[in-house]
Amino acid sequence: MQAKISALKQNAFNDIASAQDSNALEDCRIKWLGKKSETSQLLKGLKDVAPDQRPAVGALINDLKNEIESTINARRTEMEFEVISRQLEGEAIDVTLPGKRQGLGRVHPLTQTLDAVINIFHSLGFSVAEGPEIESEYYNFDALNIPTYHPARDMQDTFFLENGKLLRTHTSPVQIRVMENRTPPVRVIAPGRVYRNEAINARSYCLFHQVEGFYVDQKVTFAELKGVLGFFAQELFGKGTKIKLRPSYFPFTEPSLECDISCFLCHGSGCRVCKYSGWLEILGAGMIHPEVLKSAHYDPEKYQGYAFGMGIERITMLLYGINDIRLFFENDIRFLSQF
Amino acid sequence: MKISYAWLKKLVNFSYSPEELADYLTMQGIEIASIEKIGGDFDGIVIGKILDVKKHPEADKLSVCSVDVGTNILTIVCGASNVAQGQYVPVALEGSVLPGGQKITAATLKGVTSHGMICSASELNLSDDAKGIMVLEKINPGTPLSQIDGISDYVMEIELTPNRPDCLNMAGVAREISIRSGNPVKYPQPPEVKCTINSTDTIPIAIKNPDLCEQYSAYIIRNVKVAPSPFWLRNALEKIGLRSINNIVDVTNYALMCMGHPLHAFDLDKLNGPEIIVRTAKKNETIVTIDEKERILAEDMLVIADSVKPVALAGIMGGAETAVSDSTTNILLEGAYFNPVSIRKTSKTVGLSSDSSYRFERGTDRAGFVDVLTLAAHMIADLGKASGISTRIDTIAKKPQQVTISCNLDKITSYIGVNIPHNQVLDIFKKLQFSILEQNGKDVKLAIPSFRVDLAIQEDIVEELARIYGYNNIPMAFPGSEFIEFELNKNIQFARKTRSILTGMGFFDIITCSLTNKKVTEEFPSLFTSKQHPALCVKNPISEMQHALQTSLVPNMINVIATNARHAGQTLQFFEIGSIFIPKSPQEANEQTVLCIAVSGKAPKDSITTTRDSWDYFTFKGILEDYFLSLGLRDINYETASIPYLHPGRTACSKLNNEIIGYFGQIHPVAARQYTIDQNTFIGEFLVSPLLCNINALSRYTPLPKYPAVERDLAIVVDKSMTFQIIHDTLTSSLPGLLEKLSIISIYEGKQIPDGKKSINFRMRYRSVDRTLLDDEVDLIHNKLASVLVNQLNCEMR
Ligand SMILES: [Zn+2]
């Protein structure tokens, strides 16, 4: 009996393996598992087996049935895969062709720098304030300790408006406006657009963007200003960036300084961008002048603070190696796509 | 201003190289912008005396000179027109090399052999003067040029901040060096004069405006010979960029550049009276200044007058009539202290700025100027071989005041944030020439030297202390303060959100100029005012293109599209967040932040296998709808609108809470043609303030639907002019709650539909939040809505 089963199994397997399509396979199934199949015959013949051997032989036949069935299924799966494979072969594409891009837009490089600067100071606890671009002489000059016939007014070419006001030449008026409305401690940055009445060329434009920052409290020191500027320089221009402070003059700060950073292109060894000095000038700062505190009705005996201001165009030009300021305002996609 | 390294060396001892000096000065607040080397080592260049000058037989423009160079007499051919017998000149001998690298060899010029070359200042890299040969003064022939005092030098360009007029001269810079080197400044002393000193030689001087002129002092110098200045003086002035005129003018310039005080020399014989009256100008008075220009004077302008008329614009420029000329013999030399604001006002009004006004308006040394006057007067007497000099004639309207500043040593060091020992602070004060008038523990009262006109308050002392201590020696500290509330304001949050959404949808963020041509503001008036006024303009524009404050971002946007379309021609998507200035009355403008957004050309399906479609109205509107939703604005309505530069049938306004927040549509073909745009372009402008109202709003969770929805379709025929918005609003307001969604399946016009009508197929989705809607109930609702359309909007059912 066992030999019979074994022979039958071998024949069935050969038959299945040689089936070439699903119809032939279905024929196999009927031939080997159908009601009239040899397997069914074997089951029918079970009654002729000695009763004590019946369970064992029955199990053998069942195993045979299961084995044939799973072999047929496996062969079917194999056939289906062959069919799909052939179909997929026909669907082959050149995977190296360019993708269908949605096309992302870009944030303007000036906005990127402005945002980076805002984030650095925001992380230090500075709030953001804004003010009008049309300003009065009072906020733009007088309140900042620049009286009418002060030579410092020559430092800035002002656009005067027909209505007696002017286009602000710096964002420092926001400092006064904020201080007028808050009592110390105040720690604020004021980003915005400012104007200079200068001829337009590669180095200068009639407007630019500035970030002014200031902090007033009872014991704010020059050393803290230096600390904040050092942190800022490292955050924006990279770890290891050093700062150098030079005495300078602004009417609204005393003492005043210009802050240079170590050139991030040559790391101090000198290159064309830093004019072989190893240093790049990036911002002006100082301790807020007592007259400015008085303008905001702060008592200079009680409060002191620092202020700083930087030009976003200049920093962006340094960061990306841009040599013509006009590019920022032409908005050529070939330029904007690079950032 | 230019300064000379060699000159500084005469004024103070120091051992710094020019580069070191530049660095020290810059770090002390006196910025040195550049260093230029002049001259060279001058090997083989010696002084020669021209013994004889003959015309070259073959060339009109050449001379043949015999030149004594000490060791022998050379024949040298020279092309300069100023060559003359008896001159002492620099001669480059055969074999020498000029600073520019030119090697001198014997050369034959049209048959005459020249053994060496007589040099110009420019050939020796001493100045730009290449007009003729350089003429020195009597020096032994054969003396090497390099031995002449101060001939080779470094010229530095100094960029001073307006608070430091005390350094607008060599002595002031020397003082700054002396702070570092510790060696005292050696101020130039008046030379001994050989002429008589006549204390009775005087002139009446009256000061009518003591506030504008505190002191007027003068010297009278008699029988002066106006002549060229000696070489050392010419050389000193020319090196720092001044032209040598004559011994009188050069001395006043020397006093100015060395000591910082402007002086003026009058031809005494041309003064009426003679007398000097310092007064303000009279109505309609005029003066012709040295530059030969007639100046009309105003009544607040300070002048120096004689008994008849103004002879100088005080502190700014002298008059032409009384100026020193070659025939001048008697001189009145003026030194005065003028009010800085008055000088600046007059200089601005007249439109005339001079080296003199530049210094007076920044502040001059009130107490120290008389010494400069004395120095210059004696130099003129000496160099001009005068027969007599007066003593100083002083008219003092106001006495000089000693400036004092009180400060607390603890307070000034804690302000800096570093513990500088008090003895070190006092040592720095001493170097700065602050003398201590009183000291009471940590409180000191300082007397400020009169040349430091910029120092007035304790904080000024802090700066002085900090810059001499060294900004870079101050440690970095970090704020250790209490917590202060801080926030990003809504505008920044709005801008960031807008940028992230719109750039994600393919838009480029642009920044344009807010100043524009006035005509542009007329063509693109503000969309956000009912009453139009002319744009607010700049009074002093450099160009017509930056004349008016923009009233809309649209024209700049169109320009950006036009320029990019020219060379890119692809899909263009831009937005800008910026300020516009809405004219509120002829003199008032309201500053508003707006968002301008535009698409142009092909919609973005960038691939080789798919064709690209042009942008259309609904794709653009879809972008806006997605954008508004992302800002948390769910209830924006749209209405037909009309904007002159937009397509009359494809323009809408957006409304939030019944207020117009912006307009958008297709650009009018006429406007497009004007800007040479030949592709479909859509543009919109929106006020930012309503857009950011929900920027911080937290979305509240709505439970997901539990009960099934039921959909029903509805086909209607309606007037062509009926808008979807009206149908939508009518339906949703008739059935709040149950109508979950209203969508359009199709819109059809044409066959089977009467003229002037359109057919619309809607699909409505009904759902209740608290129960399953039954078919009967839905039928009832649906029919009710249909009848609303029939009754309220004159629709027909199909
Ligand atoms: Zn570099």
Image (spheres, grey):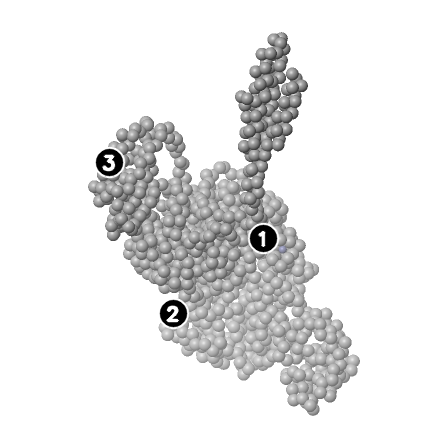
Q: Which residue is mark 1?
A: A260
Q: Residue furthest right?
A: B71
- For marks 1 and 3, give the one nearer the viewer: 3
Residue visible at 58% across and 78% down in the picture: B246
Q: Residues within 10 Å of mark 2 (few under 14, many from 20)?
A: few
Q: CA distance from mark 2 to mark 3?
A: 88 Å
| Mark 1 close to ligand 1, CB under 8 Å | no
Q: Nearer the viewer, residue B169 or B116?
A: B116
**For ligand 1, which image quadrant applies?**
bottom right
Chain letter of mark 1 equals A
Foreground mark, 2 or 3, reads: 3
Looking at the figure, which quarter contains the N terminus of chain B?
bottom right
The residue located at (59%, 32%) in the rendering is: A19
The percent position of residue B325, horizontal first and vertical second, equals 53, 80
Between the residue at mark 1 and the residue at mark 2, the CA separation in whole angstroms equals 47 Å
Q: Which residue is mark 3?
A: B784
Find disc 2 in the rendering and name its residue. B299
Kind of residue at badge 2: Glu
Task: Provide the chain ID for the residue under circle 3.
Answer: B
The span from disc 1 to disc 3 (Cα, nearest Å) is 76 Å
Query: Same subunit under labels 1 and 3?
Result: no
Q: Position of residue B314 (x, y in %)?
A: 46, 70
Residue at disc 3, secondary structure: helix
Secondary element at image label 2: loop
Residue B464 versus residue A71: which sits nearer the camera? A71
Instruction: Report the front residue among B336 and B681.
Output: B681
Q: Say whether residue B459 is visible.
A: no
Q: Residues within 10 Å of mark 1 (few under 14, many from 20)?
A: many
Say how many tags the image has: 3
Callouts 1 and 2 in the same chain: no
- Give the number of the mark in front: 1 or 2: 1
Question: CB of residue at label 2: within 8 Å of ligand 1?
Answer: no
